[in-house]
Amino acid sequence: MNPYLNEDVMWERLKDVQREMENSRLYGAHGPSLLTVLRRLGARVWWLAGLATRRPPRKRWVDVDEESATSEVA
């Protein structure tokens, strides 16, 4: 008996092939290259270093109209 003539067996084989293709697409054949891994790592380190830097305190903005109004009253 030829298994490829059986419709159910062919359907299962099709699902298996689709599953194999999806897994190979998700995981890749060889994984990411070393250069890609280093670029991602460098980008994360750069981002974390930016979060860790101390920033000067924010300047308080003074409304110019508010100062002129108080000086006219006094």
Image (tube, rainbow, N blue to C red):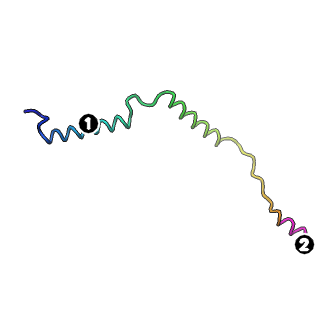
Position of residue 33 in the picture relative to residue 65 (left or right):
left
Along the polypeptide, which appears first: circle 1 or circle 2? 1
Q: Quadrant of the C terminus?
A: bottom right
Q: Which residue is mark 1?
A: 17
In this view, the residue farthest toward the left is: 1
Instruction: Label 2, secondary structure: give it.
Output: helix
How many residues crowd around disc 2 within 10 Å: few (fewer than 14), some, or many (20 or more)?
few
The residue lying toward the viewer, choosing from 51 and 17, is 17
Q: Quadrant of the N terminus?
A: top left
**Magenta stretch: helix, strand or loop mostly:** helix
Instruction: Label 1, secondary structure: give it.
Output: helix
Nearer to us of marks 1 and 2 is 1
**Three-letter amino acid code at the position of disc 2:** Val
Q: Position of residue 22 (x, y in %)?
A: 33, 39
Cα separation, mark 1 vs mark 2, equals 84 Å
Q: Is residue 68 magenta?
A: yes
Q: Position of residue 41 (x, y in %)?
A: 55, 33
For residue 34, above or below residue 60: above
Residue in the picture at 65% in, 41% down: 52
Residue in the picture at 57% in, 37% down: 44
Position of residue 56 in the picture relative to residue 40 (left or right):
right
Q: Which residues are magenta?
A: 66-74
Q: Which residue is mark 2?
A: 73
The quarter of the picture where residue 7 lies is: top left
Q: Position of residue 65 (x, y in %)?
A: 83, 66
